[in-house]
Amino acid sequence: MNEEELAFLGIRELGTLLRSGEISPTELTEVCLRRLDDVGRSLNAVVTMTEDVARREAVLAGAELRAGLDRGPLHGIPYGLKDIISAAGLPTTWGAFPDQRFDTEATVTRKLRDAGAILVAKVATIELAGGMGYDNPNASISGAPGNPWHTGKWTNGSSSGPSAVVGAGAVPFAIGSDTGGSILLPAAFTGTAGLRATYGRVSRAGAMTLCWTLDRLGPMCRSADDCGLVLEAIAGADPRDPASLTDSYSYRRPRPRREGFRFGVIAGSCDGAEPEVSANFRTSLAALAEIGTLEEVELPDLPYDDVAEVVMGAEAYAAFDEFIAAGGTAGLTAAKARGHRLAGAVLPAHDYIRAQRIRRVIAAEFGELASRYDALLAPSLGVVASGRKEDFEYMLPGAFGRPLNFAGVLSGTPTVSVLNGLGRDGLPTGIQFAGARLTENAILDAAVALETRTGTTALRPDGPYGVAAASVNGRPV
């Protein structure tokens, strides 16, 4: 097996090779380090290579596996960490502060080490996870992130690094963060799978705080199945994060579902979308109709965008009030950031309280709707990737799927986005599966079933980053 083929294998396939001895954790780690140094850096996706840590952890993983100690599916698997999440002895730049380090380590980093995963790089993020506002892809100390499917295009943000390195086959998985869509939207642009689990499933201790009541950490992978394997390793209660859930989580089960689903298709979710987005979504629905029922449903008519903006504005200002008051935003790359959050200083308390009250209504009504289905469906985005040097503010009102995205954001419910085809210039499109609280396995099973029936996980970026599949959904690409 050559390096290009190895670079795009899933976690289960890599695990089989590691346990059979066909490849060692050290050999797999060296493949990832080479690709990160080459492909990852060319895409402005790498902040810090962690060669010494990675090689040490790879040697340990190899010794443990040979001795019969198996820590689970991630044992010996390299990964990248979004650079708002701390790791002992390494810079954690938040996309803005190159010399910043922390003594404490994030819980998710520790859990991945305990699972035998190998940290190979801290990867790029939009500065301060995009929380101060930005209009252009270059709003990061790493530079404008490039899309592995077309290097002149953007990855979307703020989990730009995780999506790029996974999409380019530089690591099997990475950990991103999501406050308003920063896992789902980059996944859609880069043809990766991104899971935003139920709020509180994954501890945020040791990660940058942007919005206490919205922030979530989660996996970005090559498939929905891989997302489930990673979530199982990082989920769980943590006394360091009071919002973490005590509910246990297990993804690996004897018989995952592959049929008998009930799907709710969000009415009007393709209105105004680019033609290829609509076409791929319809093709996905036809495939899903073979494994379940489809019913068109209306989202509750509630002010999702407005409530999200008030909550994010107030909490982001509170998290960075001293930085903003000291004029720190003037040193950020994004021009918009220099004044975007100032409104938070004068936002009336009653507006924030009212927004949180409406949010409870959103959570209740959306939760009731979602509970009637295994998954609610919409395109992840209504457009394919925009230019790497292009002002993207024009795109935001057209980010179709935003009502479903923000309903999930505000209600704290799980959503996964997966690749469902290619559009203009060979760029990916995505479909999102949104569920009720704590129903990660239902939406993951549905997404895996779609991936299996349509073969979308076989799609690869063309050119130096992989070999494109010949067809998907039965159509040549």
Image (cartoon, rainbow, N blue to C red):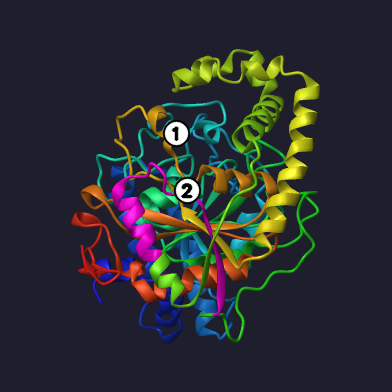
Which image quadrant for residue 262? bottom right
Dot 1: what SS?
A: helix
Answer few, some or many: residues within 10 Å of disc 2's Cα (few below 14, many 20 plus, some between 14 and 19).
some
Residue 243, image x and y in percent?
A: 77, 49
Give the amino acid type for the residue marked by disc 2 in the picture: Gly
Which residue is depicted at the point 63% across and 62% down?
A: 234
Distance Cα–Cα, label 1 vs label 2: 17 Å
Which residue is denoted by mark 1 in the rendering?
A: 396
Which residue is depicted at the point 67% across and 65% down?
A: 372
Numbered mark located on residue 268 in the image = 2
Answer few, some or many: residues within 10 Å of disc 1's Cα (few below 14, many 20 plus, some between 14 and 19).
few
Dot 2: what SS?
A: loop
Vertical arrangement, residue 142 with respect to residue 391, above or below:
below
270 falls in the magenta region: yes
Residue 378, image x and y in percent?
A: 48, 54
Q: For the residues carrying marks 1 and 2, which lies nearer the camera in this image?
A: 2
Which image quadrant for residue 44? top left
Q: Which quarter of the rendering shows the N terminus?
A: bottom left
Give the amino acid type for the residue marked by disc 1 in the picture: Leu
User: How many marks on residues?
Assistant: 2
Which residue is depicted at the point 32% across and 42% down?
A: 146
**Which is nearer the N-term, disc 1 or disc 2?**
2
Q: Which residues are magenta?
A: 260-284
Which residue is depicted at the point 49% across and 68% down?
A: 447
Camera sees residue 49: no
Q: Nearer the viewer, residue 313 or 43?
A: 313
